[in-house]
Amino acid sequence: MNAVEVRNLYYSYDRKKYAVNDVSFDIPAGSYTTIIGHNGSGKSTIAKLLLGLLEKEKGEIRIEGLDLTLENLSEIRNKIGIVFQNPDNQFIGSTVRDDIAFGLENHCFPQNEMDAIIEEYAAKVGMTRFLDSEPTKLSGGQKQRVAIASVLAMKLNILVFDEATSMLDPTGRRDINNLINELHRDQNLTVISITHDIEEVAQSDNVIVVDKGRIALAGTPKEIFRHQYELIGMKLDIPFIYKIRNALKAKGLKVSDTLDMERMADEVCQYVLKK
């Protein structure tokens, strides 16, 4: 079953040039899919179209089998949510508790159930002791954790992360990526991540590469990273360990598809000894 189905999607900001140009793809339910591309490639536009934040010009979008139309928009938003690049843009409440509660109130959760839900999802993202803190006084990584908790608490099936770690330092980025992986695994969420973080891409199930408003490549990380020079041509990169593996294969060495540096080094040593 597909959580998201997109067919022949078009969108233009200026009615002259398409930012999204005849795009089609499927995202399986329960998968972790990353969408990558250089700035201006159209990847964030795709994310906004999936949420109904922008109105498509042509094409079809189905979320869990439901057509994304104005009539269905409210029901669609009970299925899919988004965490943006800057969490400050999502804060409404004066405390972390109030902020998580805001989404629950909008989705008409019973008042007598809300406290337990807030506590549950604050705990999932490691923010229980900050529930009575002001969101503006938190660190960047803590703010993103609150933004994630606010979306998770609404018990949606699909989460979109639009450059959600791009404003964080390397430690914060790694922590949030680990959290997203954990939530995806433990809660069987469908995760769609718009990202520049190539290490995150390597951890995902599927990758969609967007270039000039079109789908340039699609597949598993291993399949995508075989296209090293095409990715470089699109101003993208691949993880260092893939570069090593590709270089060894180009030299004629029979290197397995392992991403274990130690095992790869052992294979190279065995090859040299046989020579």
Image (cartoon, rainbow, N blue to C red):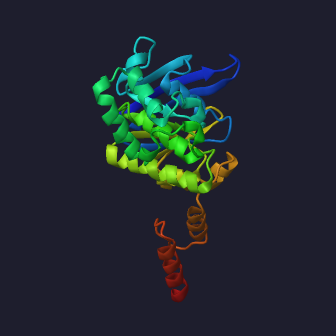
The quadrant of the picture occupied by the N terminus is: top left
The percent coordinates of residue 104 (x first, y second) are 39, 26
Q: In the displayed structure, would residue 198 be above or below residue 153?
A: below
Which of 50/270 is in front?
50
Count of marks placed on residues: 0
State the image quarter where residue 41 is shown.
top right
Q: In the displayed structure, would residue 100 be above or below residue 244?
A: above
> Is there any visible trace of residue 223 in the rendered image?
no
Left or right: 93 as drawn, with respect to 188: right
> Is there any visible trace of residue 268 in the rendered image?
yes
Which of 112/75 is in front?
112
Which of 227/101 is in front?
101
Left or right: 28 as drawn, with respect to 99: left
The percent coordinates of residue 256 (x first, y second) are 46, 69
Which residue of the protein is positioned furthest toward the top in this rendering? 71
The percent coordinates of residue 48 (x first, y second) are 55, 27
